[in-house]
Amino acid sequence: RSHEIARDHTRSPEQVCIFDHFIYRRAVPSARSCAALLLITAGAVAYIACDREFRAKGVRAYFWASVWWAVLVFQLTYGKFLVTGIPLRSLWTPVLYTNSLSILPTLLVGVASGEFTRARLEAIELSPVGGSWLLLSCLVGIGISWSGFWCQSLITATAYTVVGVTNKMLTVTVNVLIWDKHASPYGIASLLLCLIGGSLYQQAPLRDALSEEERVGLRESSLESSRNRAASKLLRQSSGDSSYGAAPASDEEDV
């Protein structure tokens, strides 16, 4: 369900922010960004508290959602490394790899879930219109993959996660308008709280930004000091040589 996907996305920014700080050397978020992350967390907790499945089954209702959440955090963190830590000739490279390498796991999941049984395969009726929509969905999926990697190359992993949180609100809106199985008004209000938090978030700068400027200034001042010392040494040597050369002339005059 779309609101469950949005809920799991709202739990991701806080964990990705920790990886941003320790792996990608981002500074600690500002007070505004911390408040935004707290609003996102509060919205996620409020949604879980009003979820019918959580009330009925407890923590077990979120087992597979938690597994997917862990994979999501890894993907968001490692995806940033793919587009910034590895020299790529084109953003189409990770798009090609991710879509190609996902074919085998998808086939294995299909076999395990019984999607390729003879009865199911014989029941498939693919009309030209259906094939056109299938092809269009594949092209749209590739476009989404490319735009995702492009966005990750421009902003931090945490900011990209927050963008994902806000984008899911459109999916939740469509779900509420079309399907009958959707979140309660209280749950939708909780997701709106996450949306407010996402709109307030500002990505953290690099921790080395200020120290790098300081290192450049220290390096320049050190070079300037070295030049001054070298000039002073040459001046002393030249003055000493002139004094040494002038002494014999004075002696000759005395003689």
Image: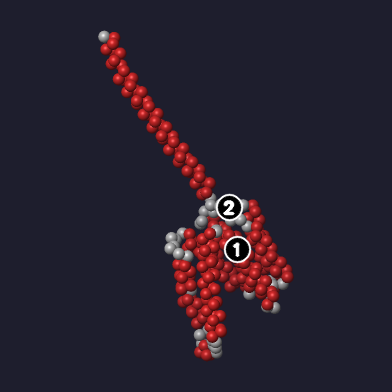
- Picture disc at residue 163: 1
**Residue 9 lies in what quarter of the image?**
bottom right
The amino acid on which the numbered mark 1 sits, given as a three-letter code, is Val
Q: Nearer the viewer, residue 68 or 85?
A: 85
Q: Nearer the viewer, residue 211 or 232?
A: 232
**Residue 175 lies in what quarter of the image?**
bottom right
* Disc 2 secondary structure class: loop
- Which quadrant would the N terminus be assigned to in this image? bottom right
* Disc 1 secondary structure class: helix
- Which quadrant would the C terminus be assigned to in this image? top left
Measured as percent of width and height from the top left, residue 211 is found at 51, 46
- The figure's colour scheme reads secondary structure
Tell me, yes or no, if residue 242 can be seen here.
yes
Measured as percent of width and height from the top left, residue 238 is found at 34, 25
**210 relative to 9, above or below:** above
Q: Residue furthest top?
A: 255
The amino acid on which the numbered mark 2 sits, given as a three-letter code, is Val
Whichever of callouts 2 and 1 sits on the residue coming sooner in the sequence is 2
Q: Residue at x 60, y 71 (%)?
A: 65
**104 relative to 75, above or below:** below
Residue 85 relative to residue 53: left or right: left
Residue 93 relative to residue 253: left or right: right
Q: Residue at x 36, y 23 (%)?
A: 239
Please rate how many residues cluster around mark 2, counting C-alpha atoms within 10 Å: few if below 14, some from 14 to 19, many from 20: some
- Picture disc at residue 28: 2
**51 relative to 198, above or below:** below
Q: Is the Cβ of the residue at disc 2 closer than 8 Å to that at disc 1?
A: no
Tell me, yes or no, if residue 15 can be seen here.
no
| C-alpha distance separating marks 2 and 1 | 19 Å
Measured as percent of width and height from the top left, residue 168 is found at 63, 68
